Every structure is written in structure tokens, then in C-alpha cells.
Image (cartoon, rainbow, N blue to C red):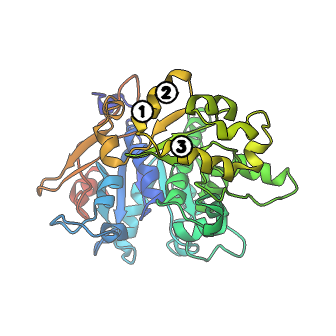
Amino acid sequence: MVVEKELPLAGLVVVDMSQFLSGPYCTLRLMDLGARVIKIERPEGGDLSRRLYLSDSESGDSTIFHAINRSKESLAIDLKSERDMRALRKLISRADVLVQNFRPGVIERLGLDYQAAQEINPRLVYCSISGYGEEGPWVSRPGQDLLAQSRSGVMWLNGDEGQGPVPFGLAIGDMLAGAAAAQGILAALVRRGVTGKGGLVETSLLEALVDLQVEVLTVHMNSGNKLPQRSGFRSAHAYLSAPYGVYPATDGYLAIAMTPISKLADLLGMDELAPYRDDPKSWFAARDEIKALISARIATRTVDEWLTILEPADIWCAKVLNWPELLQSEGFGVLDMLQTVDRDDGISVRTTRSPVRIDGQRPKFERAAPHVGEHNAAIWEEFDLG
């Protein structure tokens, strides 16, 4: 197992003033790389995401809170207390990174915006995550993931053409914004290592969602601004032709990626695809008709039966797994991406590990998320905050 002190960010202190998902996900990535993350929480209730989802744990904390705040420290700070705010400023003066995702205007009212924080600590790398950037008509709107997806255009890439806009089934804006923020912070830390000066890193849910669409949005802007047209039958990608999609077999689902129809027709034994074999333009123009024919054929056998035919022929295909199938698969098991995190009060949560391996090993941290203010006494003494 990787020793914490050997990780790339070992010795760095991150003050995490964020809550919910985007900011905490960012600091989780930094923590997994070795940084010490001190989470600033309200004395009463802490981070609102502690109660974001129902939980069976006796602590009342949600499982998602434990997943993205594992192994962090909690410092309860009353933002209305001058004593506590003095302590927070002193902590910031000794920190390397500060992350915040307050709604616009809040951090300024607290006197901890970038300019103020830079005066406290010129070496500080300051990261701000918002919903829609720092200016424009949407600045004051709630920076919530579903709403950001709604404004980003991304919903028109999911589902079949007749379904209307379809949101992603997870908080992709939050997760991507957190990952982008971590990337920016790491770059600013590298620059600080050269110049000795800190800097400001900014991103938003909307910017992260637009970046996610770089491939297809670029096509849109360079093809007469035509709107994407999803397949009307088992759509998987608005800009790709048949057979790209997911097809039901007798015992599950089979995904088939980019494959020449002529080659697939021979392997599937489908004479009915003859009109399309040698006409690549039809693979997009008639993709619904082609996919319907393929779907009917795939439905006659099991997934494994088709895999034994298609995989030896180097067809890009895969069985569609659900979570239990994924977790029980050998391919996932060898990655060793799961861990159990525990807390002194008996809380135990099974969750994921870092997606990044360092020096050939995946960092592992076994502490669950802290109680609100669990580390107050130790942090006040260590940093002499009184």
C-alpha cells in the first residue's frame, strides 16, 4: 500500500469551505493524492450533504457524504463569530489551497474572497466553483446539477429522438466541475513551485458540462449549427451511424460500437442487411431501420453466444453489466477499486478508491467522514488558532 507521506501532495494543507458535491469531490481527489483536507463546517448540522440522501446509518449522515468526505478532518466554524473567523483566517494564512463553492456574494460578505485571501496568504492557491461563472444573467441562479444540465444542452444527447430532453442519471456537472477544479489547482501548485506565488482557479458546472461536449459541440458549430438528431430506435450517440447502440438478447443486453455493416451482416447471418452493405451513407441515413433489423436478430440468442461469434472477429462489442455484475466481474476485481471506511462510532461504509494509481499502487484511506467539528481541539492547538 502507498504510504501517505510518499504521495505527491503529502504535506499540503487544503482548507475546504465547500459543501454538497462539486467542491468536496475536488478536495477528495486532492486528499487521495496525499493532501491534508480540513473541512470547514457549520457547528449546527455541518455540510448540508450530510442529509442529502436517506441513510440507514445511526449517525444520520448520508452515505454519499461519507463517500466524498472520507478521511478528511472537520473544523466547525461559526461564520458569524468574530473569534471563529479570526481562527479561520489564521488557518488560511498557513494553508496551501482553499476551495469554496458558496453562492455568488456570500464569500465576499465573509471577507474571504480571492483578493482578501491573497492578502492573508500570497502563496495560497484559491479555487472557486460556481454554477455558471462569475458574470452574466445566470450568476445568481441556483448552481444545482439538474439545472446546469438543463442549460448546457447535454440533455438532447441522451435517449431516443422522441423522448425529449433526457438528463444523465448522476450529477455529472458536479463531478466534472470538481475534477476540472482539481486539475486547475494542481497546475497552480506547479506554478507556485516555480514562482512562489499563489493564484486563482475558477470553474463552474456549466463550463464543465460544455467541455464534456467538446466533440459534438464542435461538430454542431462547424456544420451549419444543425441540432443533433438522436436515433429514434435504441439511440446511443447522436452523431454516430448504425450499428452503434445497445441491443437486447435473450438473457441481457449487448453493446456494439463502430463496425462496418457489411462485416456485421456476415457474422450475424443477415441477408436482410444486403441493401445497406455497400452504402456507408445509408448507415447513418437509415440507422433506425438498420438497428431495428439488427435488434431482431440479436434477440434470438444469448449475449455469450453472440460474443463467441463477434469477439474473435475483432468486433467492438461488450455485455452490458449492471452493478452487481460489474462488482462480481474479474475485470473489475483486479483493479482493486473498493475499500471500507470506518469511524470510531461503528460507522462502516463500503465505497470506491481513487481512480489514479501512484507509482503502480492505488492510494487507500480507511477513515470514514468525520463528525461535525471532530478535529476542532486538535486543529486549534496545532495551528495556534486561539
- Residue 20 shown left or right of residue 176 in the figure: left
Q: Which residue is mark 1?
A: 305
Secondary structure at badge 2 equals helix
Residue 94 appearing in the image: no
- Residue 366 shown left or right of residue 266 in the figure: left
Where does the C terminus fall, quadrant-wise? bottom left
Q: CA distance from mark 1 to mark 3?
A: 12 Å
Mark 3 or 2: the one toward you: 3
Tell me which label, 1 or 3, sits earlier in the chain. 3
Query: Mark 2–mark 1 contact, CB under 8 Å?
Result: yes
337 is higher (above) or lower (below) than 350? above
Residue 162 appearing in the image: yes
Q: CA distance from mark 3 to mark 2?
A: 13 Å
Q: Which residue is mark 3?
A: 297
Tell me which label, 3 or 2, sits earlier in the chain. 3
Q: Which residue is mark 2?
A: 309
Name the kind of residue labelled 3 in the image: Arg
Secondary structure at badge 1 equals helix
In the rendered image, residue 59, in percent from the top left (x then y), is placed at 18, 66
Name the kind of residue labelled 2 in the image: Ile
Give the camera-side residue of 176 and 40.
Answer: 176
Residue under the point 49% across and 27% down:
309
Give the camera-side residue of 367 and 78.
Answer: 367
Residue under the point 46% across and 43% down:
300
Q: For the residue carrying disc 3, how many other residues have a C-alpha within 10 Å: few (<14), some (14-19), or many (20+)?
A: some
